[in-house]
Amino acid sequence: DVKVTQSSRYLVKRTGEKVFLECVQDMDHENMFWYRQDPGLGLRLIYFSYDVKMKEKGDIPEGYSVSREKKERFSLILESASTNQTSMYLCASSPPRGMGDTQYFGPGTRLTVL
Amino acid sequence: AQSVTQLDSQVPVFEEAPVELRCNYSSSVSVYLFWYVQYPNQGLQLLLKYLSGSTLVKGINGFEAEFNKSQTSFHLRKPSVHISDTAEYFCAVSDLKAAGNKLTFGGGTRVLVKP
């Protein structure tokens, strides 16, 4: 079974803090993704990575950065957290295109910025 | 650019009744189509997907969906729901020409199954 783990289920931070959200997958997947989930808006892609040290912006990258130094780990960084970044953050991984295209999701991190 | 519209934000339904969740997409290229389910306090898991072939796709837990290219729709159905089907359901599309396999999601449909 594919396992995607996220470092925290719940996180509370203060405005202006630097925040790190960690995601680890154990299936040797090339692709990894960070989404944020907000009521009524579904999931929106923040960044994705299709290889180590490679990253591409998604639909809402502003205020976020990412790091992928190892294949299994993909980190989302909020350089200076703001209250409008309060949200549920979901990480996912998938094999390369042509191998089923299913994304496998972690349980999510609910971040509150005060 | 792609977009996905889930026409109902909430669907209340009685146990053992049928349910249909509607999904329409817009894209200028060929796509793959997915339905994911999110149970309370969990991440998303795949219900079913359409990649090619038969337009009627069967998934887990008795769900099925039909791809209609002319109407750009991918509606999800279940003939008889259980209390355990209470969850949020997301439709998603993947552009075949895009790098990686990014997904564009709809806004989600909350299904509340009542006894």
Image (cartoon, coloured by chain):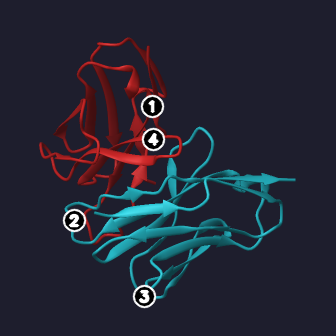
Chain colours: A red, B cyan
CA neighbours of label 1 inside 10 A, class few (<14), some (14 to 19), many (20+): some
Q: Please give the name of the residue rendered at 25% of the width and 63% of the height, measured from the top-left corner.
A: A96
Q: Secondary structure at mark 2?
A: loop
Give the CA distance from mark 1 to mark 3: 38 Å
Which residue is pictured at 23% across the width and 54% down the height? A30
Relative depth, front residue between B72 and A50? B72
Contact between labelled residues 4 and 1, with CB atoms less than 8 Å apart: yes
Q: Which residue is mark 1?
A: A87
Q: Amino acid at mark 3?
A: Gly
Element under disc 1: strand
Q: Tell me the residue that label 4 is attached to.
A: A37
The subunit carrying tag 4 is A
Q: CA distance from mark 4 to mark 2?
A: 22 Å
Same-chain status of marks 4 and 2:
no
Residue assigned mark 2? B98
- Return the chain for callout 3: B
Q: Distance from label 1 to label 2 (Cα)?
A: 27 Å
Q: Which quarter of the image is occupied by the C terminus of chain A?
A: top left
Q: Is residue B26 left or right of residue B79?
A: left
Residue that numbered label 3 is attached to? B53
Q: Rate crowding at label 3 as few (under 14), some (14 to 19) or many (20 or more) other CA atoms within 10 Å.
A: few
Residue lying at 35% horizontally and 58% vertically, measured from the top left: B103
Give the residue type that dot 1 points to: Ser
Q: Secondary structure at mark 4?
A: strand
- Cα distance in 3D space between marks 3 and 4: 31 Å
Which chain letter goes with mark 1? Answer: A
